[in-house]
Image (cartoon, rainbow, N blue to C red):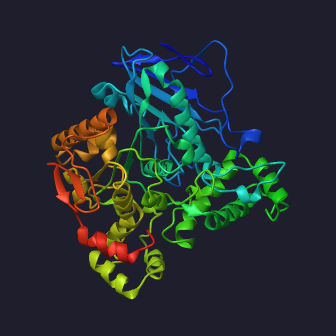
Amino acid sequence: MRRRTTSGEVLGVAERGIRAWRGIPYAAAPVGSLRYRAPSDPPPWRGVRNARHFGPACPQDRDRFVGIDATTPQDEDCLSINVIAPEGSEAGASLPVLVFIHGGAYAVGSSREFPRQGEQLVREGGIVYVSFNYRLGGFGYVDLTAWSTEERPIDSNLGLRDQVKALEWVRDNIREFGGDPDRVTISGESSGGNAVTTLMTVPSAKGLFAGAIAQSSPTNAIYPRQVTEKWAGELLELLSREVRDDDLESTSHEDAVALLEKAGAHHIVRATSKLFLRAPDDQPGSIFLSPVIDGDFLPERPLDAFKAGRAHPVPLIIGTNDREGSVFTGRRDILATTPLRIRAIFANTTKKARKAITKQYPGLPARRPALDFGGDFSFWFPSVKVAERHARFARVYFYRFDAAPRILRLAGVDAFHGLELWALFGRMNSAFGAAMSLLGGRRAFLATAARMRRRWLEFVVTGGVADWPSYDPFRRRTLIIDRVDRVEFDPRGERRRVWQDFVPHI
């Protein structure tokens, strides 16, 4: 199946009721003089390009966090996009489009992490599904613009700019794959959810999507330049040690430019990984790799834009899982879940607010309440604020995903961060999905998953969900997704009110 893009023709593959095109460049390789520059158009190619295989992932640490597996190739030339369409769909079919942005703390992951992801949604909903890679870690989410020079300029928000570039590719090309550029819904989980809520406030993303789905978004993990510049300076120091060149100490613009040009991808990955692990203790409550409020591409904090009605007024599904923080241990230990980090956050509020929040997490800072505190701080409460603010200007559907097979409850992790992806994308046939079913609950979880997919697909197709009441700042109707779905009015309302007093700046 050939399709024409703005850069040339591509040849895909037909598989089990779908058609797929993979590894299509949506931007030029960000290497050489284009490293640390905004994405530019890919060069055209002659003839027909083979689009049967995924492109390489952005360079990342496979071990320190939970990244790609050993079989996934890595390369700085990673800006590729994938399209899945229903079998028989033709150019100009005007099908609704779902664009999924992968998560991974902006440090790891790729669009090929689960190669069959999206196929079930395409078969069940008759939609077009799009995924893509973008720059991660020290290549896409460290703000090095303070070291920019006239001879060697450096741009801000590179990973975020990649995402806008991918959406522009969808706008310009998706009709050739049967999709309608006016019916695009963006979606993402974790840092991918952060990408969604951030893109809703990026001026240049206006008109590129008609709906949004943000799952477990750390919405407030966006920082001003005085914070991100400090991290960038620390990265340059670590990078200098990685390349073992004592003459390059990053004390001047020229030194920094030389270092950034000389360093190999593996040097940048290692330096970023080291800073990624120490940043949660150096600045508790923050997430090191993040977009920056640069006053231009991202002019303001997204939560402020939502409050003022300056976010793009598209319908939104947003929510979190029951216990977001329960698995942020070991290699995932990046949240405010340790006594040191919790004390640092408590130091920034009043004694009355501290006492009230402690009552919500009995035993704090013991392990279980600490994990719940960290998860609520990073994911749940900021998502509540987005929902209540955006609901004044556009339709919002708020959810909490509680469904968890018995073995997860016995293990004490319950509905953890990312579990809903196994429902949404039909991953229960994977090794982990099978393990989750060892003590029962598989049939109930699959039924819950089917209902969730139906609602997500209805939203992608129509922009609404008939059996899901919209959210507002007064009744706060929330869909609880569980063995039996239900709507609750302001679940955990007391906790929500206490959090407002605890972190009034959110």
In the image: residue 358, left or right of residue 487? right
Residue placed furthest toward the bottom: 351
- Between 251 and 151, the residue placed more toward the observer is 151
User: Is 52 located above or below residue 418 in the figure?
Assistant: above
- Between 407 and 286, the residue placed more toward the observer is 286
Q: Can residue 245 be seen by looking at this rendering?
A: no
In the image: residue 183, left or right of residue 236? left
- Between 436 and 136, the residue placed more toward the observer is 136
Q: Position of residue 375 (x, y in %)?
A: 37, 64
The residue at 44%/61% (across/down) is 330
Q: Position of residue 320 (x, y in %)?
A: 33, 55
Q: Quadrant of the C terminus?
A: bottom left
The residue at 46%/77% (across/down) is 345
Residue placed furthest toward the left: 484
- Between 402 and 127, the residue placed more toward the observer is 127
The residue at 49%/22% (across/down) is 21
